[in-house]
């Protein structure tokens, strides 16, 4: 048996559109809490990263090239820096 305050408690998972659609079809009873997170970062292929990094490494420092490539591709600086280390060795 649920607590009297938890009678309508439920959990709905999904992306924004899925959750919105669910609640449009099934109106919430009582209060509602929505938890959102940032979108997952897209992973980039090594080939795409290499083609961007190689010319940058010829003109910029390892750190500067990594920072700039990470900003352009929208991936983590750590991932790009690790790849740049491999390319320079």
Image (tube, grey):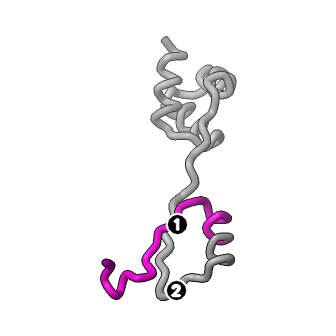
Most common SS among magenta residues: loop
In the rendered image, the residue lying farthest to the top is: 89
- Is 9 a magenta residue? yes
Is 79 located above or below residue 19 in the figure? Answer: above
x and y percentages locating residue 74 in the rendered image:
61, 44
Q: Position of residue 57 (x, y in %)?
A: 59, 23
Assign the N terminus to one quadrant of the image: bottom left
Residue extending furthest toward the front: 1
The residue shown at (46%, 72%) is 10
Nearest the viewer among 22 and 46 is 22
Instruction: Name the secondary structure under disc 2.
Output: loop
Front position in the image: 29 or 36: 29
Q: Residue at x 62, y 78 (%)?
A: 26
Residue lying at 43% horizontally and 77% vertically, measured from the top left: 9
Residue 24, position in %: x, y? 67, 77
Q: Which residue is mark 2?
A: 29
Q: Nearer the viewer, residue 56 or 79?
A: 79
* Residue range highlighted in magenta: 1-20
What numbered label is drawn on residue 12?
1
Cα distance between the residues tagged 2 and 1: 14 Å
User: Does label 2 or label 1 sit earlier along the sequence?
Assistant: 1
Please say if 27 is above or below 88.
below
Q: Residue at x 54, y 32 (%)?
A: 66
Closer to the camera, 31 or 67?
Answer: 31
């Amino acid at each position: 048996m649920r607590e009297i305050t938890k009678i309508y408690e439920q959990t709905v998972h999904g992306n924004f559109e899925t959750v919105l659609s669910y609640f449009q079809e099934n109106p919430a009873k009582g209060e509602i809490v929505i938890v959102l997170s940032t979108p997952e970062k897209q992973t980039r292929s090594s080939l795409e990263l290499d083609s961007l990094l190689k010319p940058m490494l010829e003109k910029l420092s390892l750190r500067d090239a990594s920072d700039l490539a990470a900003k352009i591709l929208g991936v983590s600086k750590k991932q790009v820096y690790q790849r740049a280390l491999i390319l320079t060795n």
